[in-house]
Image (cartoon, coloured by chain):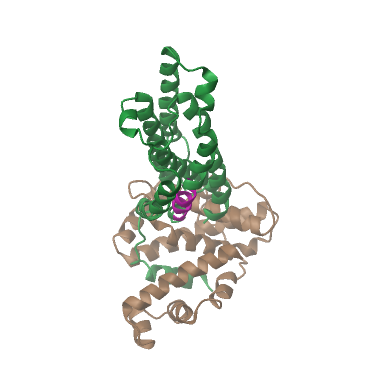
Amino acid sequence: MREREDEWTGLMLLAISGDGAAYHRLLKAVTPVLRAAARRGLARAGQPVDQSEDIVQDILLAVHLKRHTWDPEAPFAPWLFAIARNKLIDSLRRRGRRVFVNIEDFADTIPSEPAAEIAPASEVAAQLQSLPARQREVLQSIAVDSASIKDTAAKFAMSEGAVRVALHRGLAKLTAKLREQ
Amino acid sequence: METDRLIRTLAADNAYRARPVGFVLALALLAAAPFSVAMFFAELGIRPDAMTAMRNPFFDLKFLVTLALAISAMAVSLHLSRPEASAHGWAWLLLIPAGLLVAGLVSELMMPQQLPVMTRLIGSNSRICMTAVPLMSLPLLAAALIGLRRGAPSRPALTGAVAGLLSAGLAATLYASHCTDDSPLFVATWYTIATALVTAIGALVGSRVLRF
């Protein structure tokens, strides 16, 4: 457990120094832990556990957009679990239940828990449709068509800088819309 | 959308660097300050005997208390803007302005008094103090909340309340240069009521706008 969390901190340090691959690995590594905690939260609230994927994506977006509030001197896991706990409580509340989520829900999770019967997430995809055209096109190009920033720039005759701006604004707007819904 | 695709998209945005919360908070407060200062000079202005008043330690104490409140509240609010922050270990900072005020009250108590307690307590400006401090804090409170929205506070109402303390501290610093009531008894009563009002507004608005 300890080792895993040290590895996360190391990856996050690499990520903020500009290593996109390390950031990708970090997000991949934390996702099963977040998913297991989301399923447990849903189960405890008497909600269908197969709804966990929307919550996982909600947490990932918040992690991404609030990265700058992480203190590089501090371990990454407590920060991550605090973000996750907030979003999980929020999501469960939105689904109509008031529940208490324990921080240990995250810390004790073993990532190899069975991940069966998960319904595909639908909220992000739905909100994607309500974004301004340019932001939606850029996001779809990168997310759905797996295009790089460079390819996306060429496809829409934009500069790479403009693609980066549209990508970030799109993600921020998406998150705001998810929160409002 | 599949989570793997979302992760790939987030990783593609790794180059984006958000500005630190403290930087945005400072910038927002600097942008809002002219509004509060304009309100101050339009309606109140610095008291005419400010130069002589500076020789009165109780006049100076007002600024010490209000600035200590603003600075410590700024530090606490920045701390609370981190999601894993707990209020423990930082809340004591807010005791500094309170302690300064208590020290002022005690020393006034030990001095020979020409004015009766009730005169010092009620003063001549209590109503202006009660309206001017909250009104002048509003632009600063809005700015503080905008800045703190960049953060990820796990306790939005508490963080909003501290933003209220911060803006009331700054507004009260302005007001202190106008007000001719220097008795710590007056400050402890009316400044505190005005600050409490702004703090309540901050908590109320913060609980809505500071959620992330």
Q: Residue at x 65, y 59 (%)?
A: A94
Whether residue A4 can be seen here: no
Q: Look at the image and say whether residue B48 sits in the magenta stretch.
A: no
Which chain is assigned green? Answer: B
Counting from the top left corner in percent of width and height, residue A90 is at 59, 55
Counting from the top left corner in percent of width and height, residue A95 is at 67, 59
Which chain is assigned brown? Answer: A
Which part of the image, by quadrant, shows the N terminus of chain B? bottom right
Q: Residue at x 61, y 66 (%)?
A: A181
Q: Nearer the viewer, residue B167 or A88?
A: B167
Q: Is residue A144 above or below residue B142?
A: below
Q: Is residue A15 above or below residue A100?
A: below
Q: Nearer the viewer, residue A139 or B168?
A: B168
Whether residue A91 can be seen here: yes
Counting from the top left corner in percent of width and height, residue B9 is at 43, 72
In the figure, residue A119 lies in which quadrant? bottom right
The region drawn magenta spans B137-146
Q: Dominant secondary structure of the magenta stretch?
A: helix
Counting from the top left corner in percent of width and height, residue A127 is at 56, 73
Q: Residue at x 43, y 56 (%)?
A: B150
Q: Is residue B175 left or right of A159 when viewed as pictured?
A: right
